[in-house]
Image (tube, rainbow, N blue to C red):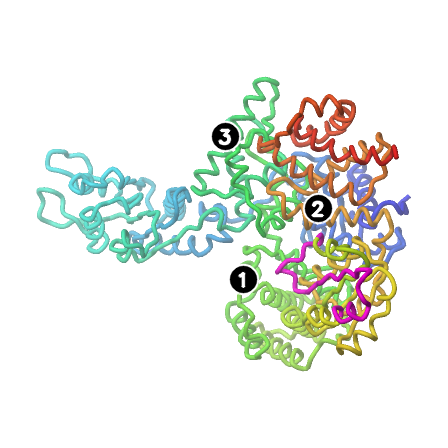
């Protein structure tokens, strides 16, 4: 049943878990239910470690529910979401809890016992705004009325909202009385009229109404856009801050300013226009631009405004992860103001479709996004991180009901378990595998998780560990906030937690040839210090875990990767292969291509090989990939000529190179792969089916991922392949790498052009259409799936260019 070799091992593991899940749902039995790695290894006849790896990968992809315990159990998330669409289904259930606890708890996740303040609910409260919120709380609580505070940030960043949150916090905590006011002074209204500002602040003899200071009594007096005031207006504000008193017109005695003075500016605090005022503010809070914030926070902000829009229009809103990707990837010059406008514009355009179709769901697709938004998307390093986060969403579409609730995004808002996700693992795995898993998880760890992990230990414990390791020269460049050091903190914190609770280590000790006496000495010092600080006794095996992690940090920091030489017979074959895998400056390894021309002497070519071997070698040897004799036994020749250790792999083709490069790149986040690791390297990629799969994945991840701006490369390729296979089948043409590359690279770019409403023109389109009408019709029929998936209509000019790909293929068949 589960031994279908056409399915990948991961999918067979998922099928086992899914079958059990469906049976549990049918029986409504949710207590102590789930599939573990050991049982799966028996059912599928695979190694337990492989079963464990696939389960963890499936969970990280957002497809499984992980239930912590002994053993760790897994269930299918998709099946439970479908069975209980309005229930909160977590992807992680901590030890001691059951899935039934959440199914019986109601629609919303269990809330914490304490009432969260306005600040605690703000996006970024545990991330990019931690310091700002801490400063704001301190300023508000300072007696008697709070410290004068200046909010700095660019246009549209949310300074006014932050000021209101400060006021709400003061009301919630009882710092302000229930009748305290939030009084706003728009400084633009007094830009060149300090006298008018004086009258509004202090009052006049003619009017007996309360002045602004009296209205703000016991609350907040907020000067919005303070840089707009002229010099005399600024002097009035400075006097209020500096003296804390004022005199009403017609009076001789001083009155206290019984309010907290708050101000905002779009300029830097030390700019020439504002420094005369800013130096009098004891608290200055700078708010970051939306594009400077963590990707996860940016997603939260976007989703929060979609939630508000659903509430406002009292309609459900639905959009794909691709549409959300566009909003996240775009830059917002005027920050939240511009973001909010783009969301409202997209919703208003989608609303027009509702009027026509009488649907009760507002569905947003690419056609509803403004060209301005699409043109502001950009290619950057954040693309992979965005995709990684969005892939955690269990469904392809994001859905908000008319109340603004969205069950699909619960993991973004309930990440109190994020640290615990890294704390425990499968029982009885090897120490090296355990450490490798820690490193791979740390590679994509968001800032908020770093903060949470550091908070697991007392500040004195963190400082002690940092002081111990940085006294050694090899670790002096290790930053206190680097992911590697955070990983070490996590390793130590978990060891302390397990020691306190008498929980055995989730790994078994191993002999590590990389371990040096220095790492043993450092781990001893760390353990002794933690024992003294926490009054515990950490075990020897936990000490070995800390030692192994120190060794891993050293390898990541210092061990050099192997070099790669690609050698082929013919003209430009090797060079084209290397160009395709797109080496970048981020790659730690070096790779070079050499093509052996038939008119070139072997002796001269060998000299080139020796020269390039020197270049790519960084001290760990060179891997040579080649197609045929006489280069299949170069190890001894290269070693004798250069002294460089080499290994040779034959049967060179593009899938083989892709697989090797993927191994080398993945090792950057883990251990650096040694040359010996390739001695028994299985070149399974040269099998045709695996070859195509690997080739397409490589094309998707590393080529299309770089050139596409806003559509999801994986979704685009999956959709286009359905159309391509249909076209090839109907034309009776055999697929190969050349067709795949031409069709996929052209049509993915075409998708973005059509979505942007910028299709290419085609000269003499009518004539071409008349000559190839049947072929165009065939291709258009198979591209309907693409049109439906992306909500577009491919125009005739673009169809003509696609048709040109197949014309020479048809001619070849007739020869």
Provide residue 400's location: percent of width, then percent of height. Answer: 59, 33
Q: Is 513 drawn above or below residue 221 in the view shown? A: below
- Horizontal arrangement in the rendering, residue 121 relative to residue 589 (left or right): left
In front of the other: label 1 or label 3?
3
Provide residue 798's location: percent of width, then percent of height. Answer: 67, 30
Quick check: is 596 in the magenta stretch?
Answer: yes
Which mark, residue 700? 2
- Horizontal arrangement in the rendering, residue 226 relative to residue 782 (left or right): left
- The residue lying toward the viewer, choosing from 338 and 305, is 338
Residue under pointer 1: 455
Provide residue 352's location: percent of width, then percent of height. Answer: 55, 21
Residue under pointer 3: 345
How many marks do you count on the picture? 3
Provide residue 777's location: percent of width, then percent of height. Answer: 76, 24
**Mark 1 vs mark 3: which is more N-terminal?**
3
Asked if the residue under mark 3 is in contact with the one under mark 2, i.e. CB atoms within 8 Å, the reply is: no
Within 10 Å of disc 3 (Cα), the crowding (few <14, some 14-19, many 20+) is some
In front of the other: label 1 or label 2?
2
In front of the other: label 2 or label 3?
2
- The residue lying toward the viewer, choosing from 678 and 293, is 678
- The residue lying toward the viewer, choosing from 60 and 763, is 763
Query: Which quadrant would residue 707 be assigned to in this image?
Result: top right
User: How far is disc 1 from disc 2 in space, using C-alphas?
Assistant: 39 Å
Which mark, residue 509? none
Q: Which residues are magenta?
A: 580-609
Quick one: SS at disc 3? Answer: helix
| Image quarter of the N terminus | top right
């Amino acid at each position: 049943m589960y031994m279908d070799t056409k399915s990948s091992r991961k999918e067979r593991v998922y099928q086992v878990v899914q079958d059990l899940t469906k049976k549990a749902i049918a029986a409504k039995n949710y207590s102590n239910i789930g599939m573990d790695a050991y049982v799966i290894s028996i059912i599928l006849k695979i190694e337990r470690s492989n079963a464990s790896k696939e389960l963890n990968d499936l969970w990280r992809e957002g497809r499984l529910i992980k239930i912590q315990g002994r053993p760790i159990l897994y269930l299918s998330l998709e099946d439970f979401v479908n069975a209980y669409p309005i229930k909160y289904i977590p992807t992680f259930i901590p030890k001691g809890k059951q899935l039934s606890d959440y199914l019986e708890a109601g629609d919303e996740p269990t809330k914490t016992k304490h009432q969260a303040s306005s600040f605690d609910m703000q996006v970024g409260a545990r991330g990019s705004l931690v310091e700002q919120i801490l400063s704001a709380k301190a300023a508000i609580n300072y007696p008697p009325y709070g410290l004068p505070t200046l909010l700095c940030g660019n246009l549209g960043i949310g300074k006014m909202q932050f000021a209101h949150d400060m006021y709400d916090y003061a009301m919630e905590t009882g710092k302000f009385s229930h009748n305290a006011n939030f009084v706003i002074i728009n400084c633009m209204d007094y830009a060149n009229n300090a006298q008018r500002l004086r009258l509004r602040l202090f009052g006049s003899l003619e009017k007996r109404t309360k002045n602004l200071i009296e209205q703000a009594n016991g609350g907040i007096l907020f000067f919005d856009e303070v840089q707009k005031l002229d010099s005399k207006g600024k002097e009035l504000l400075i006097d209020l801050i500096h003296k804390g008193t004022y005199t009403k017109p017609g009076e001789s005695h001083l009155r206290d300013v019984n309010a907290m003075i708050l101000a905002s500016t779009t300029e830097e605090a030390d700019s020439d226009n504002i420094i005369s005022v800013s130096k009098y503010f004891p608290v200055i809070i700078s708010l970051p631009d939306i594009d400077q914030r963590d990707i996860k926070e940016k997603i939260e902000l976007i989703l929060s405004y979609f939630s508000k829009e659903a509430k406002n229009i009292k309609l459900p809103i639905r959009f794909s992860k691709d549409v959300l990707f566009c909003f996240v990837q775009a830059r917002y010059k005027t920050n939240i103001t511009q973001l909010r406008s783009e969301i409202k514009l997209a919703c208003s355009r989608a609303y027009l479709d509702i009027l026509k179709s009488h649907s009760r769901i507002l569905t947003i697709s690419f056609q509803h996004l403004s060209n301005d938004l699409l043109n502001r998307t950009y290619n950057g390093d954040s693309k992979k991180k965005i995709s990684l986060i969005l892939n955690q969403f269990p469904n392809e579409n994001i859905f908000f009901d008319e109340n603004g609730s969205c069950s699909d995004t619960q993991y973004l808002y309930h990440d109190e378990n994020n640290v615990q996700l890294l704390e425990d693992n499968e029982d009885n795995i090897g120490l090296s595998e355990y450490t490798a898993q820690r490193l791979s998880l740390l590679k994509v760890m968001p800032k908020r998780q770093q903060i949470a992990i550091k908070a697991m230990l007392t500040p004195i414990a963190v400082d002690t560990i940092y002081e111990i390791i940085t006294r050694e020269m090899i670790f002096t460049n290790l930053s206190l906030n680097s992911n590697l050091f955070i990983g070490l903190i996590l390793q130590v914190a978990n060891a302390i937690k397990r020691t306190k609770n008498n929980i055995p280590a989730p790994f078994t000790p191993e002999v590590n040839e990389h371990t040096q006496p220095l790492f043993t000495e450092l781990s001893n010092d760390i353990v002794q210090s933690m024992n003294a600080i926490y009054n515990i006794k950490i075990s020897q095996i936990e000490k070995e875990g800390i030692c192994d992690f120190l060794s891993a940090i050293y390898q990541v920091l210092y061990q050099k990767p192997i070099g790669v030489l690609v050698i082929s017979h013919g003209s430009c074959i090797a060079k084209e292969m290397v160009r395709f895998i797109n080496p970048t400056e981020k790659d730690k390894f070096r790779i070079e291509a050499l093509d052996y021309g038939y008119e070139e002497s072997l002796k001269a070519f060998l000299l080139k090989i020796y020269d390039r071997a020197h270049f790519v070698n960084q001290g760990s040897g060179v891997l040579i990939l080649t197609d045929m004799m006489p280069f299949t036994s170069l190890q001894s020749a290269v070693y004798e000529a250069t002294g460089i250790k080499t290994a040779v792999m034959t049967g060179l083709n593009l899938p083989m190179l892709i697989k090797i490069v993927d191994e080398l790149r993945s090792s950057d986040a883990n251990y650096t792969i040694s040359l010996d690791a390739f001695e028994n390297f299985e070149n399974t990629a040269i099998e045709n089916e695996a070859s195509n799969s690997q080739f397409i994945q490589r094309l998707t991840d590393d080529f299309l991922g770089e050139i596409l701006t806003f559509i999801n490369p994986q979704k685009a390729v999956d959709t286009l392949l359905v159309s391509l296979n249909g076209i090839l089948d109907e034309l009776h043409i055999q697929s190969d790498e050349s067709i795949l590359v031409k069709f996929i690279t052209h049509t993915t770019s075409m998708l973005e052009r059509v979505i942007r409403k910028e299709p290419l023109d085609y000269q003499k389109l009518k004539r071409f259409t008349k000559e190839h009408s049947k072929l165009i019709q065939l291709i258009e029929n198979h591209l309907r799936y693409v049109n439906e998936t992306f909500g577009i209509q491919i125009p005739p000019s673009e169809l003509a260019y696609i048709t040109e790909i197949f014309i020479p293929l048809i001619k070849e068949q007739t020869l």
